[in-house]
Image (tube, rainbow, N blue to C red):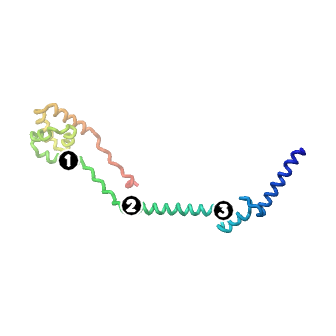
């Protein structure tokens, strides 16, 4: 035990002396010497040694960058013209009705030649809008020339006529 006291005693005495001299400002030890700390406090008036000032500068720089980016985005938006409005899609049903009105005055034999290359589904859509008498005369004329085509067309008309009418879309803004 005496050996421990003989070794630790002088070490504690020397360490305490060094700390005391540093706190008194006689020996310059970073973090313990008050004159370094005092200079920073007096120079920057920041008890944290300039840390708060650097945070403030960083925040100001960040705010400036954000403002500059917002100005650049606003200038870009102002310089680019708005996109053109989308082209309206053609109303196929309206076109079928208009064509049916014209075809009502065409001779059934001529109509058979006109519609030679039409798909049965597309032709059936127009025939559904025509007068029933004209459609029956057309199918009779077509059956004498092309019975298979007349049959396919009749089935297409049947299928289209059996479909339920489309449900109109409900606009959420107008229902409120």
Viewport quadrant of the N terminus: top right
Indicate the secondary structure of the residue bearing disc 1. Answer: helix
Between 97 and 56, the one nearer to me in the picture: 56
Indicate the secondary structure of the residue bearing disc 2. Answer: helix
Residue 162 place in picture, x, y as percent: 26, 38
Q: Between disc 1 and disc 2, whose residue precedes? A: 2
Is residue 59 something that shows in the picture? yes
How packed is label 2: few (under 14 Cα within 10 Å), some, or many (20 or more)?
few
Between 75 and 85, the one nearer to me in the picture: 75
Between 123 and 10, the one nearer to me in the picture: 10
Residue beneath the point at 59% across and 61% down: 55
Between disc 1 and disc 2, the foreground one is 2
Residue 97, numbered label: 1
Q: Between disc 3 and disc 1, whose residue precedes? A: 3
Disc 3 designates what residue? 49
Between disc 2 and disc 3, the foreground one is 3
How packed is label 3: few (under 14 Cα within 10 Å), some, or many (20 or more)?
some
Is residue 133 something that shows in the picture? no
Task: Find the distance from the CA under tag 3 to the CA under tag 1.
Answer: 85 Å
Tags 1 and 2 touching, CB below 8 Å: no
Residue beneath the point at 39% across and 55% down: 173
Between disc 3 and disc 1, the foreground one is 3
101 relative to 66 in the view: left or right: left
Disc 2 designates what residue? 77
**Going by the picture, which residue comes out furthest to the right?**
2
169 relative to 38 in the view: left or right: left
Indicate the secondary structure of the residue bearing disc 3. Answer: loop
90 relative to 9 in the view: left or right: left
Residue 79 place in picture, x, y as percent: 36, 62
Viewport quadrant of the C terminus: bottom left
């Amino acid at each position: 035990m005496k050996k421990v006291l003989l070794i630790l005693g002088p070490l504690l005495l020397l360490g305490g002396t060094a700390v005391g001299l540093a706190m008194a400002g006689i020996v310059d030890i970073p973090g313990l010497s008050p004159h370094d700390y005092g200079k920073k406090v007096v120079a920057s008036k920041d008890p944290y040694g300039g840390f708060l000032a650097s945070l403030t500068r960083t925040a100001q720089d960040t705010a400036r960058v954000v403002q500059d980016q917002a100005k650049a985005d606003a200038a870009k938006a102002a310089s680019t013209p708005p996109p053109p409005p989308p082209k309206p899609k053609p109303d196929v049903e309206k076109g079928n009705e208009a064509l049916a009105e014209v075809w009502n005055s065409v001779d059934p034999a001529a109509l058979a030649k006109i519609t030679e290359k039409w798909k049965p589904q597309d032709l059936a859509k127009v025939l559904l809008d025509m007068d029933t008498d004209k459609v029956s005369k057309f199918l009779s004329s077509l059956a004498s020339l092309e019975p298979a085509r007349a049959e396919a067309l009749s089935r297409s008309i049947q299928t289209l006529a059996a479909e339920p009418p489309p449900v109109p879309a409900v606009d959420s803004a107008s229902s409120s």
